[in-house]
Structure formats: structure tokens, C-alpha cells
Amino acid sequence: MSRKNAVFLILLACLIIGCEDLPNRINRGNRYYNLRRYDFALQQYESAVQKFPESDIAHYDLGNALYKSGKFTQAAEEYRRALATENRVLRQKAYYNLGNTYLQLGDLKYAIDSYKNALELNHRDFDAKYNLEFALEQLKKRQLQQEYQSGPSSNKVKGQAGQSNRDKLSQTEKPPAKKSGESLEKQGRQSETELNKMSEEDVMRMLEALRGDEKNLQVLQLLRRIPKKRVQVEKDW
């Protein structure tokens, strides 16, 4: 074998190893991710991103691991980078997960925009529809609360006379927060309807969420919050 051919084979081997390196790192990260070892998954995904900064899938997977680790600000950054992909499916999932991340951060307007973008790419994404409705409802409640708190000072009367006047207000004049009993009853009926439509997988996810959360959160608010499954790296890409 000539020296020229030997050099060519060495360069070719380096190229092949480099091309395989990204799937290998991501696959290792996926294994840790599925085992819920998100710290180790982060290491693999971060390594993949550092060596292949143009890989949209690496940024997407890193965003998922950051989300699971509670690092929502960093997760949002990675999901935004993943949006540069030309893969329509991956972009749709990135928008959906970005909406979930903004929801966790309390940025309802950005969450709403993200869910809308996800639905433009896949109008049959019922999780995105559900979360969009939830985010819109929460935004409306927040706006009503802000309007009530910034209302005329004449409504903020003091003493017994003020309390008496407030008692005389009609039900429609009271702030939404006063209708907690009615809201809970209505939400209970909605919850029952949703539960009847759930698949076995959704029910298991709900039960798992309830077991892991000791706070008094409503069942419907716990559903469909985790990122969707990652787009798997194709071996022949």
C-alpha cells in the first residue's frame, strides 16, 4: 500500500468516526434519559452540542434533559436553537416543549405563541390544543386579578361599613376568586369528562404525577406538561 493511499484511508476513517460520534453520544444520552439519570444525560447531550453545535436534534435533546432537571430558562434557550431545523416534525415538537417551558416560567404570552406555532405545524396535536386553552384561561384569570387589584379606591372600603357594602354586591360584581366553589364544581365535572376520554397511558401519567406531587394542584393542570418524546437520531443520516 502506498503512503498516499494510507493517508487517504486514515482521513476517511477519521471522517467516519466523526460522523458516528454524534449518534453515539446522543444514544448514550437517550439511555440515561430513559433511566431518569438526567445528570448523566446532560453530560452526553452537552458534549454532543459542543462538538456539533449545528445539530438541531442535539439542542432539542439537551433542552429535554434541562427541562427534566428543572432548568427551564436554559431549556428554553436550547429549544429555540432547535427551531432552526428544517425537520417539520422536530420543529413542531420544539415549539410544543418551548410552550411547556414558558408555562413553567410563568410567561403565559410566550407560551400561548409557542402553542399556536406548534398547532400551525400540526393542527391535530391535542396536547398543544389542551395546553393552549389552559394558558389562555390562566392569562385571562391573571388579567382579571390585575384589573380587580388596580380598581378604584372607592371599592376598597374599610371597617364594618365597608364589609357590609361588599356583602351587598351582586354575584356578577364579585371578583372571579370569590367563585371558587362554583369553579371547583364545574372543573370537577370537566375533570370527569376528561378522565373518561383518557387512554390507559394518560391515566398512568396522571397517577404518576399525583404520586410525585404533594401540593394541592388540580389534576387537569398536571396532565400533558412533560416534554414529548424526543425525535430519535437516524443511524444513516
Image: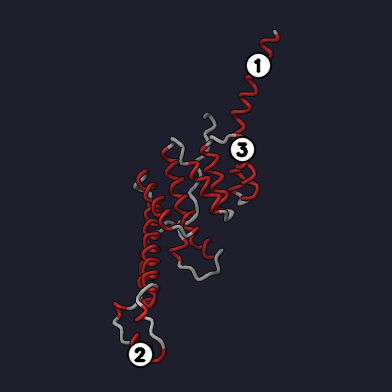
Q: Which residue is mark 1?
A: 9
Give the position of the N terminus as an image quadrant: top right
Q: Amino acid at mark 2?
A: Ser
Tag 1 near tag 2, CB within 8 Å = no
Kindly state the secondary structure of the residue where label 3 is placed: helix
Q: How many marks?
A: 3
Q: Which mark is residue 227?
A: none
Between discs 1 and 3, the one toward the N terminus: 1
Label 3 – label 2 distance at C-alpha: 65 Å
User: Distance between the Cα atoms at labels 1 and 2?
Assistant: 90 Å
Residue 164 badge = 2
User: Mark 3: few, some, or many residues within 10 Å (few <14, many ≥20)?
Assistant: few
Q: Which mark is residue 50?
A: 3
Residue drawn where x is 53% and y is 45% of the image: 78
Mark closer to the observer (3, 2): 2
Q: Secondary structure at mark 2?
A: helix
Residue 42 drawn at (x, y percent): 62, 46
Q: Residue at x 52, y 62 (%)?
A: 209
Residue located 42% across and 44% down the image: 92
